[in-house]
Image (tube, rainbow, N blue to C red):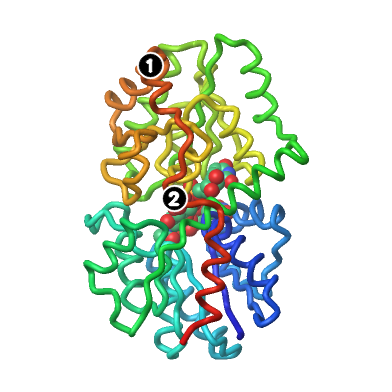
């Protein structure tokens, strides 16, 4: 079976790496690995760990690309590639422009689509933007819907996502497969990276605290993103024994406010984008995490790290219900108040730091390959 697997951004590469590794292990599969190159540097930082070199790299990234630009280029380029290679099916992941445009390209060519991480919903079309709509479009054209959780399956059933005679299967999220691989790699060969070294050094004093930060969502750009930065600065100023480490996303709409608002605070350390093992090691070193990332919301509970999510809604409610994640919005005061509470209340901290993995058991990829190979 000729299985094409496409990714374009950092999280897709992380979450599809276990699927690619598993596909390579199956003798019946002829994998075709395609990168749209929606991201450039941020992809490279992932592929190394998993020794993945795309068979085709479309190199689509442009600085500060608009949604229309990247969507149009991905749709055209993927149509060319799929026409030339005619795979038996195409695997897409998640809710990015790459995933949405690639699924559409395959649909137009009557190539069946398998959707990994299907069924996530906020039911709010503008948050996350444009991902909520991307994932609904993919659901409409997919044959296989690999849902990470029962909740995701319920949404797919509610939305009648069997239009193409397709199949829904709860597999767990492949991000947990990837995380466990990374944790093993970190243990076998601890990454060396200056910001990680500084964090480990800082944590040698038992009174010190370490908070890991990420932030990049498009719907927050502008005022909400500034509020988020101001909240972080308030936390750092009120708690000098806490160090905030922030690997800054390469999007210029993120870089500018982060450097302007946080660049001069001594206990905020702005870091470059980290490769996956270094980031996983930093999650392990941290006391808690402040993020708007989807993947980090899934990984942190599996590592027993509390998370404050700087969004008003999440399509990943499972860990919120389980108690490890709290939604604080991109709002200065609620963000500060929750971080302050986590830094000062041992009881709250311990309640939120229970290790749990509502998103998977680390064996999602073999389930996906089994389903794809026994298709009828
Ligand atoms: C994209 C996804 C988002 C995902 C995020 C992961 C869409 C619509 N959004 O958002 O769902 O959570 O990736 O990070 O698909 N850039 C670089 N180098 C890189 C990567 C990005 O310079 O390696 C800069 C470029 O200026 C680029 C900009 O970031 O134009 C935005 O990248 P883009 O992929 O359009 O959107 P993200 O905000 O990264
Ligand atoms: N990540 C990484 N290096 C970093 C920041 C994040 O490897 O400097 C990893 C993180 O562990 C998670 C993924 O990137 O697996 C999340 O990607 P991102 O936040 O870009 O996208 P999202 O998950 O929000 O779609």
- Dot placed on the residue nearer the N-terminal end, 2 or 1: 1
As measured in the structure, the alpha-carbon distance from the residue carrying label 2 to the one carrying label 1 is 25 Å
Direction from residue 312 to residue 284 in the image, left or right: right
Picture residue at 43% right of the left edge, 14% below the top:
237
Picture residue at 50% right of the left edge, 19% below the top:
265
**Res. 64 in view:** no
Residue 282 spot, x, y in % from top left: 60, 33
Residue 12 spot, x, y in % from top left: 52, 60
Direction from residue 56 to residue 261 in the image, left or right: left
Q: Establish if 159 lies above or below 352.
A: below
Q: Are marks 2 and 1 in contact (CB under 8 Å)?
A: no
Picture residue at 52% right of the left edge, 60% below the top:
364
For numbered disc 2, what is the local secondary structure? loop
Q: Nearer the viewer, residue 180 or 286?
A: 180
Q: Nearer the viewer, residue 151 or 45?
A: 151
For numbered disc 1, what is the local secondary structure? helix
> Which residue in the protein does label 1 denote?
347
Picture quadrant where residue 1 is located: bottom right
Q: Establish if 183 lies above or below 9.
A: above
Label placed on residue 359: 2
Direction from residue 24 to residue 289 in the image, left or right: left
Residue 204 spot, x, y in % from top left: 66, 15
């Amino acid at each position: 079976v000729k299985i094409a697997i496409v990714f374009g951004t950092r999280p897709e590469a992380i979450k599809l790496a276990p699927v690619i590794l598993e596909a390579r292990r199956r003798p019946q599969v002829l994998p075709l690995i395609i990168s749209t190159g929606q991201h450039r540097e941020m992809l490279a930082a992932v592929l190394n760990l998993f020794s993945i070199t795309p068979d085709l790299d479309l190199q689509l990234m442009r600085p500060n690309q608009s949604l229309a630009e990247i969507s149009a280029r991905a749709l055209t380029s993927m149509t060319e590639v799929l026409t030339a290679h005619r795979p038996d099916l195409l695997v897409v992941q998640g809710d990015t422009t790459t995933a949405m445009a690639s699924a559409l390209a395959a649909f137009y060519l009557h190539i069946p689509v398998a959707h990994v991480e299907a069924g996530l919903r906020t039911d709010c079309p503008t948050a996350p933007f444009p991902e909520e709509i991307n994932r609904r479009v993919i659901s409409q054209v997919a044959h296989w819907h690999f849902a990470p959780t029962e909740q995701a399956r319920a949404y797919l059933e509610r939305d009648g996502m069997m239009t193409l005679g397709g199949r829904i299967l709860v597999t767990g999220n492949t991000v947990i497969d990837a995380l466990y691989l990374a944790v093993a790699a970190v243990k076998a060969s601890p990454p060396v990276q200056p910001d990680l070294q500084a964090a480990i050094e800082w944590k040698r004093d038992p009174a010190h605290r370490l908070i890991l930060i990420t932030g990049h969502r498009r719907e927050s750009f502008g005022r909400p993103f500034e509020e988020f930065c101001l909240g972080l600065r308030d936390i750092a100023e009120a708690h000098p024994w806490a160090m905030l480490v922030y690997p800054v996303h390469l999007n210029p709409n993120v870089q500018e406010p982060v450097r302007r608002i946080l660049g001069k605070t001594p206990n905020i350390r702005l870091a470059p984008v980290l490769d996956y093992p270094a980031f996983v090691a930093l999650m392990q070193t941290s006391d808690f995490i402040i993020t708007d990332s989807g993947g980090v919301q899934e990984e942190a509970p599996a590592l027993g790290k509390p998370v404050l999510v700087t969004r008003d809604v999440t399509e990943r409610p499972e860990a919120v219900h389980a108690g490890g994640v709290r939604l604080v919005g991109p709002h200065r005061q609620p963000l500060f108040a929750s971080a302050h509470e986590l830094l000062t209340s041992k009881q709250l901290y311990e309640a939120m730091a229970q290790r749990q993995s509502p998103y998977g058991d680390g064996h999602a990829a073999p389930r996906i390959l089994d389903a794809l190979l026994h298709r009828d």
